[in-house]
Image: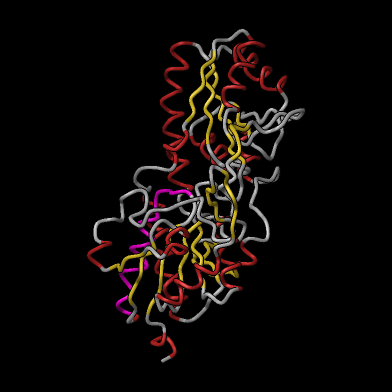
Amino acid sequence: MAQSKVRRIGILTGGGDCPGLNAVIRGVTKPAQDYGMSVLGILDGFEGLVEGRAKELTNEDVSGILARGGTILGSSNKGDPFHWPVNKDGVIEILNKSAAALKNYQAWNLDALIAIGGDGTMHICQKLGEMGMNMVGVPKTIDNDLEATDQTFGHDSAVWVVSEALDRLHTTASSHHRVIVVEVMGRYAGWIALNGGIAGGADIILIPEIPFSWDKVYEKILMRELMGKKFSLVCVAEGAKPIDGLMVTKGLDIKRHDPVQLGGIGEVVCKKIEDNTGRESRVTVLGHVQRGGSPTPYDRILSTKFGAFAIELAAQRKYGRMVALKGSEIKNVRIEDAIARQKLVRLDTQAVIVAKKVGISFAEG
């Protein structure tokens, strides 16, 4: 009988978009009628929560969206209610708009709010929960950097894009006897570069967790040439940095909670390789193509499971929890535990060990 008291839930997608968001929305909305619930879709992430923009979701709204990339609700990585940018006469001021978020939550008569997002979204969920909102989190990020879940949805799709790109670049690198550097996303975590690099047969993988030696990079390329292999593929994470250097950044965006905009390491690596080995080199930056397009079958399944489990948590009034993949089963963990630390690549991670065994270099100093 306790389950029937939960009559109305909200759902939003926070942070950057990725394949699988629509599958979660579908996974929440379709079972809602079985629980006797209505679902309110909040538009453009936490921006819609602060500004009061939302629409009712029905089965018709989510029909046919399983394979569609992006999110039918819209998203934003600049809508943190606790870090709200306002332009006053050309000057950006940061305000706390959490009171407006709470007011709309109450005005919409929501019993719970399901928030789909990554590390930043889960931090916001924790704060909103402390204000009295009943929060349920769903882990989404191509970066796969949430410690409490074995994998986030969106990661597999991003890895597929990297793998496909490396497959295609392999043939052109071989044809022209070039070194091709591929820069991928991931921010401070190297999971996309690591898994995509292994899947795509990269010869060198550079990730934030293992500061690299320039000499080791050159050495690997020249050693391959001595073995008769006149081309090399380098997969570099946007947050990778040399032992004696810093991460390469494009600038700062104070409207975001984490203002650092990473990017540009691929160009640096490419030029250094060409200048120091004399080998013709090219760079490809995959960028947002990793976040777009249709989700892989794995991500469609995982997203659907996450969505259906999230509404079950709401129905059971298990708030302050985040759904999580543990082995092959969907469990739930406390949001505060999920954000305790980032999940970064460790040197003893099996994928790193296996990569080294098959000859991939991390250019360790």
Asked if the stretch drawn in magenta spans residue 98, the answer is no
**Magenta region, main secondary structure:** helix
In what quadrant of the picture does the C terminus appear? Answer: top right
Q: Answer above or below: position of 8 versus 359.
A: below
In what quadrant of the picture does the N terminus appear? Answer: bottom left
Horizontal relation, residue 32 to residue 120: left or right: left
Q: Position of residue 302 (x, y in %)?
A: 43, 58
Tell me which residue sits at (38%, 59%) in the image.
43
Asked if the stretch drawn in magenta spans residue 31, the answer is yes
Q: Position of residue 344 (x, y in %)?
A: 65, 48
Horizontal relation, residue 173 to residue 203: left or right: left
Residue range highlighted in magenta:
16-34
Q: Answer above or below: position of 248 versus 102.
A: above
In front here: 322 or 58?
A: 58
Tell me which residue sits at (43%, 75%) in the image.
312
Q: Position of residue 148 (x, y in %)?
A: 60, 61
